[in-house]
Amino acid sequence: MILEHFLLSVSETNCYIVACSETGLAAVIDPGEWNEQLDEFIALQELKLDTILLTHNHHDHTGGIAAVKEKYGAKLAAHHSNNDAEMKLSNGEVFELGSLKIKVLETPGHTEDSMTFVLGCDVFCGDLLFAGSVGGVPDRMSFDQEIAVIREKIIPLGDDMVLHPGHGPASTVHLERLYNPFLIP
């Protein structure tokens, strides 16, 4: 598997490219903007950008979608409520990108359409969970939902899972379970 992280200038959003090292099929996760650095990586690695994975529908995660579609013809894979998605995703679904298997988790809280993608020991959680924090929410009900989702769907994935959030540094389930002040009972 190929995994590369890019820090975008728009709201310091994390963008990721994952690819099957056997077939070169690639997906970009949360292209908040599209820039030359991303194009250069795809060309250097000789990847075929096939899919856009969207963790949620906020502009700092979606701003580059049109450019990716125009340049690469990639299809948008997002929550089943997203009218623009060519690939509508639902909880528990597993889809293939070359020989990679990507599991889809619906993880509402930050937004109702929040999705998390699990690929091996890597968890792409968007703005659901950050190193030492959780995503902002509009009200107490959404906050309670977000914390419940983290406890019910993310923590059980296992302590060794690496969390790749939408902003800030990577972490692990282990570190967040023990030290995230929002998750300590």
Image (tube, rainbow, N blue to C red):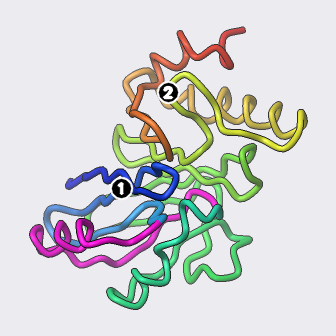
From the top left corner, tell me how far across and down residue 174 is, in percent.
45, 17
Q: Is residue 142 left or right of residue 81?
A: right
Amino acid on which the number 2 mark rests in the picture: Ala
135 shown above or below 71: above
Which residue is rendered at x = 53% and y = 44% of the image? 125
Residue at position x 22%, y 63% from top? 20
In the picture, which quadrant includes the C terminus? Answer: top right
Q: Which mark, by number, is residue 16?
A: 1
Give the structural element (helix, strand or loop) at label 1: strand
Q: Position of residue 12 (x, y in %)?
A: 46, 49
Q: Is residue 37 magenta?
A: yes
Residue in the foreground of this view, choosing between 137 and 2: 137
Please provide percent x and percent y for residue 19.
Answer: 25, 62
Q: Which mark is residue 131?
A: 2
- Front residue of 99 and 137: 137
Give yes or no for contact between labels 1 and 2 (Cβ–Cβ under 8 Å).
no
Element type where label 2 sits in the image: loop
State the image coordinates of residue 72 (x, y, percent, origin top left).
33, 86
Q: Which residues are magenta?
A: 33-56
Q: Quadrant of residue 87?
A: bottom right
| In this rendering, position of residue 51 left or right of residue 38 | right
